[in-house]
Amino acid sequence: MALALGCRHDVESRVGTHLFGISANNSGSTFLKAAMATSRATWNLDWEGQGMLGYVGPNILLPRLANRLWASEQRWIDLVTDPRNYDWPRTRKAWYFQAFARDPGACVFYTKTPAHLLLVDELARHFHNAKFLFMVRDPYAVCEGICRFHRSGRAHGRPPPENLSELAARHAVTCMAWQRRNLEAHGHRGVFFTYEAMCAEPERVAQDIRALVPELDDLDLRQRLRVKARYHEMLTDMNARQIARLGTEDLAAFNRVFRRHEDVLAHFGYAVMDAAA
């Protein structure tokens, strides 16, 4: 099927809803993005919003420590949350130009950028009819994915920081704290679900999303989709597999951080794990 390209259509006049995926990195948002792109109602981007040509804002994939750890240090949070670092009209125009859709009549623009979890206020302010898909995932699985990424050498070829485990845990719990804040301020504009619920009950989660955005009447989360250009798979809960990879040193470092924020984990139904389990 030939795709409609934004550079050949007046996307701005057709988009009635701007829908944003709001979750930390390593939380399952890439699968959700791929599923969204199969709907005939959506305009989509090839990459995360921050990775598109013409995006005006901090690209947190580039700095040495911010790559997947942008909520672990206040200096990165300050960088991401400073509204002076953004030009949303220019970014929106660039996104529209590079967007694609299965149907040129699509009326929902969808994108996700993990660091935008810290920018929900700005997105709500600068995008017409902004709505949000808020998601969290077991922080141990999130941290395992982050640590594995850095240790694999894929972080721009740079060695991982010595305190990687602590940074990953601080990043994960800070993202959860911000997500709680997002839901308090903007829950009425979105739908909240966990990664685990999306995997276990994809049809219920899809129904909730369709209730928020009725135009997505063909959204299907039960698909075999290409994820991160590496594999095709059905939606599968990878938590147990990832957590089983964790060594005692990583678990101990995660727990030192998580024990100071047990209320944040508990708010979303998670708990500090027994390292001996």
Image (cartoon, grey):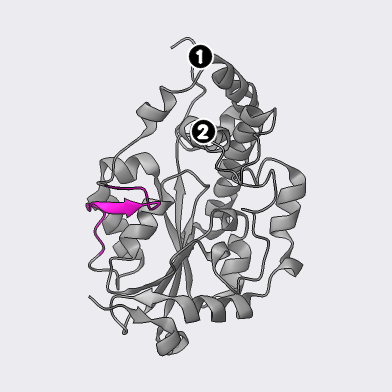
Give the CA distance from mark 1 to mark 2: 19 Å
Where is mark 1, residue-wise?
275
Residue 9 seen from this side: no
Residue 192 lies within the magenta run: no
Left or right: residue 275 versus residue 85 is: left
**Position above or below: 118 against 96:** above
**Circle on res. 244:** none
Q: Position of residue 257 (x, y in %)?
A: 64, 26
Q: Is residue 46 left or right of residue 24?
A: left
Magenta segment: 219-232
Amino acid under disc 2:
Arg
Prevailing secondary structure of the magenta residues: loop
> Residue 228 appears at what percent x and percent y?
40, 51
Which badge, 1 or 2, comes first in the chain's sequence?
2
**Who's the residue at 26% across and 78% down the image?**
2
Identify the residue at horizontal 52%, vertical 47% (top origin): 25
Q: Name the residue under label 2.
A: 148
The image quadrant where one finds the C terminus is top left
Secondary structure found at label 1: loop
Q: At 54% from the left edge and 37% from the top edge, which residue is drawn?
A: 146
Q: Position of residue 109 (x, y in %)?
A: 42, 73
**Residue 203 shows in the view:** yes
Element carrying mark 2: helix
